[in-house]
Image: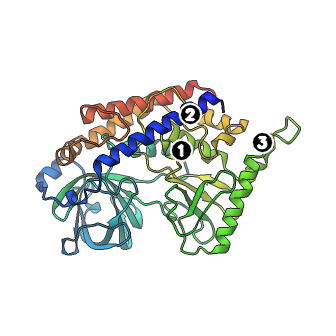
Amino acid sequence: MKKTGKFLFNAILTLFLFSSCAFFSNTGDTSSEMYDSYKLSDETLAAAGLPVVKIQTENNAKILSKENWYNATISISNSEQDSYNFDSVDVSIRGRGNTTWPLRKRPFALKFSKKQEVLGMPKHKRWVLLANFTDNSFMKNVVAFYLSEKLGMDYTVRGRYVNLVLNGNYVGLYWLGEAIKVDKSRVNIDEDNDYLIESDIYYDEAWKFKSAIKNLPFMVQNDDSMNQTRLNNLESRINEMEQVLYAPDFPYVSGTSNIDDTYRNYIDLDSFAKFYLVNEIMCNFELSHPKSCYFTLDSGTGVLKAGPVWDFDWGGTNPSNKLFLKYTIYYDSLFKIPAFREKVNTLISQLSSSDISREINSIKAEISESAKLDGQRWGTVFRNPVGEVRNSFDDYVGYLDKCVTDRVKYLKRNSF
């Protein structure tokens, strides 16, 4: 990487982190606001056009922990199909998120006692309610998931927009979706032998290690059958992969001009190319830390795959003609491989900026009335930590549309 490129990347990252710190210093822990009285009639919520989710905690308990589950019941009404509605089903609820958890409008995790179909999505016990509080368009995650589907990633998280009522009070426009879990309808790997991995600087799971060369944090998410031997095997495999990717002459056979394709035994180029494009298009700087980067490793083949994609509420904020993520995680090495560059070029050619724009405006039409209700509940002050300030929901959506479509056009012009 050229020195000027490194300087530019570090300068952008520093500015991003500084603005983030300023944002959170202004918000603080304001959990009590979630439980302020704020009533909306059923008619008003129904008129907004989205499903209405009502959660009632036992004894009106406030949800103040990310570790402890609270007993509750959940009801869903106003769905597009009557069969999706249900009333007073037992559920457990707790807080979730890292940087988003202390904010005024909080995200939650849900756990049913048995697998439950939700809004037409496949049955599972575990679900999430994302607040999208730092995203005034409410749709950066959903646009990223759309790109993931278009690029054909193995699994793309499913979800639906809803209006949430908690203990009788309207708390805003949320996204009710699938938690990233091993399951035939989600991350379809062998629960007992394969690995669902998260790379995240919070480094707060039980089974974890940091890689030898890149010092990347890896945490095992499907840990029910985890033991030290399995963790050691995973760590050894990742370290072997890094030794290949960061050999002095990589990707060439030492002393020759021939490509050494040993890397194919360790890393899946196709998934990493798709993962890169979703994040690069969305300008998702989470890869720079890294945060919320998910991978799977097949214990039989020993091959590492990238995905599913997750956590884009801080992305989608830059239409610039620059490559922001080409030197994050393992991409500094992967982009040396001609076959990887070819895959990226082929994949980006398959995306249509006009199709993306239509999708964004379709989502806008779906949630616009609910976005107004959410704005009346929460306002927009301090809701954007990365410095993009617009005057209205429509303007924020328009800016996101410009950012994403301009990025796609630029990447199509840029030969990798």
In the image, residue 120 lies at what x, y percent? 36, 58
In the image, residue 292 lies at what x, y percent? 49, 53
In screen coordinates, is 147 left or right of 2?
A: left
- Along the polypeptide, which appears first: circle 3 or circle 2? 3
Residue 238 quadrant:
bottom right
Type of amino acid at the residue the image marks with label 1 = Ser
Type of amino acid at the residue the image marks with label 2 = Ile
Q: Is residue 19 above or below residue 53?
A: above
The nearer-to-camera label among 3 and 1 is: 1
Q: Quadrant of the N terminus?
A: top right
- Along the polypeptide, which appears first: circle 1 or circle 2? 1
Q: Is residue 315 above or below residue 63?
A: above
Mark 2 packing: few (<14 Cα in 10 Å), some, or many (20+)?
many
Residue on which the image places disc 3: 250
Q: Is residue 281 above or below residue 330?
A: above
Residue on which the image places disc 2: 348
Residue on which the image places disc 1: 288
Label 3 sits on a secondary structure element that is loop
**Viewer-proximal residue, 147 or 72?**
72
Q: Residue at x 72, y 38 (%)?
A: 337
